[in-house]
Each structure stands twice: as C-alpha cells, then as structure tokens.
Amino acid sequence: MHRFGLLKAPGSTSRSPELYQKLWSGHPQSKHWSYQTFDLEPGIDWVEWLKVAHDHGWSGFNATVPHKIDVWNAVLDRTPVAQAVGASNCLVRTESGWQCHNTDADGFWLAWQSAWGTYQPQHQRVWLLGNGGVARAIAHALMERGFEVLVFARTPRSDFFGLNQMPFSATAQAPQPDLVVNATSLGHGKQSGLAPEVVWPKLQGGWAMDAVYGDEPSLFEAQAAQAGARVLNGIPMLEMQAKKAWDYWSSMLGIADF
C-alpha cells in the first residue's frame, strides 16, 4: 500500500485528491494507493512531523500555501530545481528520509506553453505578481528560459533572485509584458473576491495566468479578460504539477507505468 497526502492550511480547499484519482484511473495497482489531505497550522515542527510520517510509512506528499517554504527548510535533501527555487511542493520518500522536489516551475511552464498553439512571445517579458513560494518557482522557470521578470508585491523579500520588487502601483509605468501572472494568495480561500491592485495594460494578443483556481473566474481573471488577454486559470498548472509529482513518486518507488 502506498499512501500519499497533501499538506495544506486548515479551511483551504484543493482539487489534488480528485486529480490523482483521475490520473490513477485504470492503473492495475491503483486500488493499493490512497491520497488524503492534512490540515496543518503554519509554524509546526516540520522536522519532527515529517520524521513521524516517514516512520509510519508514508510514500509522498504535496505541499501547498503556506507550507512550501517551511517544508523546504525542514528537508535538506533537495533536487537542483528545489534548491534554486527555495520552496518545495513535493516530497518523495527515500530510505533515509525525504527528498524535496519542486513541480511548480515545470507545472507553470508546461501549462502556459501547451496553450500557445501558434503564439510566440513578443517581448520576452512577464509581470509576476507576488513573491512567495509559487512566485519563486515561476520566476525560476522564466529566467531559465531567458525571460525578463518584473516582480510586483505588497512587501519586498530580502532574497528573490536579486530581482527588484516593486509595489503593484508601479505597473502603471511598467513596459509591456507577454504575460501577467497572479502568484499571490489574493483570490484564494478567505481572500476570494480580491485581486492585486495593478494598472492593466492593453493585452490584446497577450496572456494572463492565475495560479489560483476555483469554480468561478477570479477577479484577476475577469480584469485580465477586460484588458484583452487570453486567460488561463490555475487548473492546467495544477494538472501539470500532479503529473510531475507522480513521475517522481512512481520512479522513486518503482511503480510501473501503464
């Protein structure tokens, strides 16, 4: 029996359980796999919690806001991408403990790129709203591919790849982007109905992506559509993240593919 789980904040919702059930559908071993959520308050002793989970035979975990950076700090065995990003949303069981991965970076890039069709970026520039764990992953994915990343956030962080972090109001003077990404928590959970206070450019031919997802379009998505952008919600990114996490889990645990 392989057991997997999601480490999340109390009260938040996630589609991860249904995504993995869909991903596993039809696999001859799927009846031996389970996925459950854990509602965990920020600031717990992650080193101890993960040690107990390892002792009890858990196979892997996803982590979401607000736990990505704390989990990364608690696990010293990190892949190069997780090390570069400084946050982890995927833990894989090893004999000695846990290994940190980050699937946000690839999940974001694959979600955006797979929607392109014949589109080609014109400016090689992205406005990134937010500077938390998922924003770090997105910035890493973009910089690795040669994009200029302009970061806008409520409160600057001391270490964000050396990038300048401007207030949302600075979008009024910012040069034209190919893509605007909402990587803040605005629009999620208790902050649903909110969006970063940006000054929208005309985005005809450009894109907007919301890392938040829900049953209805977020305020950010509605504003992006009004600006003329082609809009993606967070579901394609979540789906790509789940596929990458499953690749890591199944490879490490020796689970055969279909």
Image (spheres, rainbow, N blue to C red):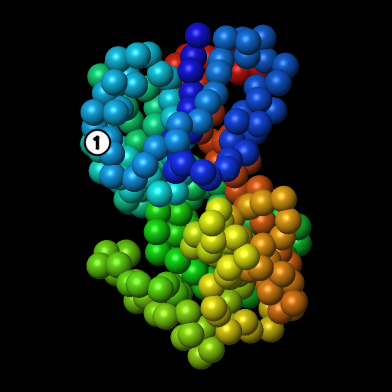
Tag 1: residue type? Asp
Residue 227 visible in the snapshot: yes
Nearer to the camera, 90 or 185: 185
- Where, by quadrant of the figure, is residue 197 drawn? bottom right
Q: Residue furthest bottom?
A: 173
Q: Residue at x 50, y 59 (%)?
A: 185
Q: Residue at x 23, y 28 (%)?
A: 48
Place of residue 253 in the rendered image (x, y in percent of width and height, measured from the top left)? 45, 16
Residue 143 shows up from this direction: no
Image location (x, y in percent) of residue 95: 30, 16
Q: Residue at x 58, y 41 (%)?
A: 14
Q: In this view, does 75 lie above or below 124?
A: above
Q: How many labels does the image show?
A: 1
Quadrant for the C terminus, please. top right
Where residue 59 appears, x then y in whole percent?
42, 20
Give the vertical position of 43 relative to 158 (above or below): above
Residue 36's place in the image compared with 214, above or below, is above
Q: Which residue is drawn at 66% across and 31% down?
A: 18
**6 or 209, nearer to the observer:** 6
Q: What element carries label 1?
A: loop
Residue beneath label 1, please? 45
Label 1: how many Cα within 10 Å (few below 14, some 14–19, many 20+): few
Q: How far from the left and from the top, in percent, is residue 202?
A: 69, 83
